[in-house]
Image (tube, grey):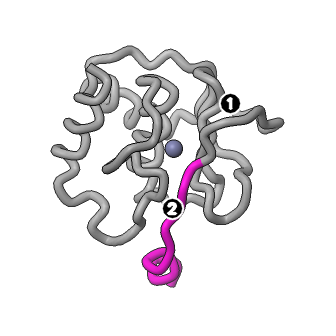
């Protein structure tokens, strides 16, 4: 049922501003971080990545400065890769919003991982 609801909305991320949320490393996210490092050829140097409160139901996650990434605590597991790659694009690569994975309005539907490899290449190329 949740998937059907998500099909109808686009959601974004909060890119700026100081937040009070403190999160600690969530080890479930480590394989995704490792994959990102390998894909983009960078070392991820952030102080914390985990799950916490975001600013309402349309915010999937946010990146604070270059040091902390928070993913919405209610985020379905199948969205972790997309949202974490997006936030790492901000925090680890210093990218702003553009298109593809870095779109300001992530289009959440059942085709989000179609052509994933190409989307990742586009993301990493934006940095290099
Ligand atoms: Zn963003």
Q: Position of residue 3 (x, y in %)?
A: 45, 77
In which quadrant of the rendered image does the C terminus lie? top left
75 w.r.t. 117: above or below: below
Magenta segment, which residues?
1-13
Residue at the image point whose x is 73% and y is 50% from the top: 53
Q: Position of residue 40 (x, y in %)?
A: 27, 25
- Which of the 4 image quadrants contains residue 78? bottom left
User: Which residue is under mark 2?
Assistant: 76
The furthest residue to the right: 20
11 w.r.t. 81: above or below: below
User: Which residue is under mark 1?
Assistant: 24
Most foreground residue, 53 or 8: 8
- In the visual, does 25 lie left or right of 105? right
Q: Position of residue 85 (x, y in %)?
A: 40, 40
Q: Residues within 10 Å of mark 2 (few under 14, many from 20)?
A: few
Magenta-colored stretch includes residue 86: no
* Residue 47 visible in the picture: yes
Residue at the image point whose x is 66% and y is 36% from the top: 16
């Amino acid at each position: 049922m949740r998937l059907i609801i998500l099909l109808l909305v686009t959601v974004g991320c909060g890119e700026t501003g100081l937040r009070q949320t403190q999160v600690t490393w969530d080890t479930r996210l480590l394989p995704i971080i490792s994959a990102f490092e390998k894909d983009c050829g960078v070392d991820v140097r952030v102080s914390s990545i985990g799950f916490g409160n975001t600013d309402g139901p349309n915010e999937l996650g946010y990146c604070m400065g270059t040091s902390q990434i928070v993913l919405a605590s209610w985020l379905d597991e199948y969205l972790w890769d997309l949202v974490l790659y997006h936030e790492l694009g901000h925090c680890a690569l210093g990218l702003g919003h553009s298109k593809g994975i870095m779109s300001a309005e992530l289009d959440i539907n059942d085709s989000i991982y179609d052509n994933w490899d190409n989307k990742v290449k586009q993301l990493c190329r934006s940095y290099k």
